[in-house]
Image (tube, rainbow, N blue to C red):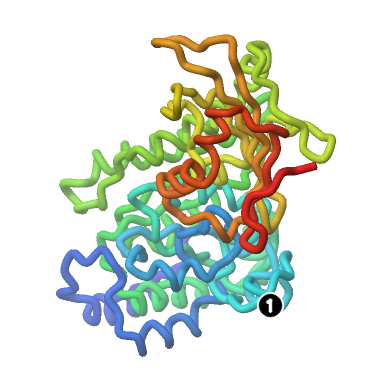
Amino acid sequence: MEECPGIDDALEEHGKILQTVGANRGEIATVMLTQSEWKTLSEKYSHYGSWAVWNPTRWKDTSVVSENLRDLKTSVIVVGLNCSGHWAGGETYYDTDELLQQHKGWRNFHGGKQDYKLAYALNWSPYRGAYLTDIIKGEFNVDSGNVKKKIARGEIKIETHLIAFRDEMDDWKVRPNALFILLGDVVRELFEDYLGRFYKNRVQIRHYAARPHRNERYTDAKYVEGVWQKLERHYENTKAHYNTLPFERNTSMRRLLKELSASKKVANRRSKGYEPIPINGKRSTPSDQARTSLIKSLLPFEGQIIFANQPWRCCLCEGVDLGKSIVCQLWFVRWEGNEDSSEKRALTLTIERELLTSAPEKNIEWLRSLFLDNWLNYGLSPPGLRISKSRGVEELA
């Protein structure tokens, strides 16, 4: 993409003003704003921007932003090209649930079909809470190639968008050495041509909605691993020069990647007799299972040994999202010494999502005290239970 002298001059002059305003900010990682400033900026940018926080039980619900203000940070900025759907700033939404209708802001990156991949990559990482935005505002198009052509033809006034982007960064008090994560090739080209001189600490990652290359088997686990490897390398290479926010894998990240990778091993586990229980007469497929890892992270039973009257190991845990409730398919095998015995028990567990917390350990402790230890001890039947707020624990017919 060729440089344009007129745009360069405008940005350079604009940059002098912003650099003066932004001097002496210090190494502030979190968003430091008054309530009044937050309200003003939310009204200004919530139709176009968002934050890298997702509710793992209801990932389209953007009320999670206001509930996790302490997690928000502007030391990391994730940059896309443009919004792919009108839902980001309009009045319509995919889900008609009243809760979602009450939180219409910050929808970008929280409602697209592939957005869950970005959630996998960031929501449990050190970069949780990063600011998410696009360079081009108000241009709704799923094809970045078409957007690039419109810029080349002058149908999109790129100068206006670039200056607005710099204003946006200044409004959020983004420091010059903040990390910019660029989604895809077109974003990298635009950023390097016009914005790179102002924000030098940047790294490109693959766009979460990018189509696989020919003959490429591109799983969710492969995407997440690729993103994490790039961010890890970038942190190591830039921490001294730019004081880049550390990016190191934690226990939750390792567990999530293990679950995503395990979705490819279902056939092997079935061969050992751990067949998932059909739900509504239909067995879940590997692609379905890959998309339920966020649910599984709330109930990380798999691999755990539960010491009831006898020790039982959970050898399979799969989750299916049914809207207001989730269904977990659990297989337990009695643990003898360091080996599995031949005694197995299967359970289909339906739980209203509002009963679960964001702390997985508390969810497991609650279920054990509620019924699970007794179920394992005495082999209660039928192997299907529903837990609801209004009716408690009841057997499924």
Residue 192 at x, y = what percent?
A: 41, 55
What is the three-letter code of the residue carrying label 1? Gly
Of residues 247 and 96, the one drawn nearer to the viewer in this rendering: 96
Q: Which residue was labeled with disc 1? A: 90
Where 264 sits versus 362, above or below?
above
| Rendered-image quadrant of the C terminus | top right
User: Residue at horizontal 29%, vertical 40%?
Assistant: 248
* Residue 121 falls left or right of residue 275: left
Residue 132 at x, y = what percent?
A: 47, 63
Hey, which quadrant is residue 165 in on the image?
A: bottom left
* Residue 177 falls left or right of residue 164: left
Hey, which quadrant is residue 264 in on the image?
A: top right
Residue 315 at x, y = what percent?
A: 54, 23
Q: Residue furthest right?
A: 281
From where the camera sits, is residue 204 visible?
Answer: yes
User: Residue at horizontal 25%, vertical 51%?
Assistant: 244
User: Residue at horizontal 37%, vertical 72%?
Assistant: 169
Residue 309 at x, y = what percent?
A: 45, 26
Of residues 379 and 138, the one drawn nearer to the viewer in this rendering: 379
Of residues 317 and 246, the one drawn nearer to the viewer in this rendering: 317
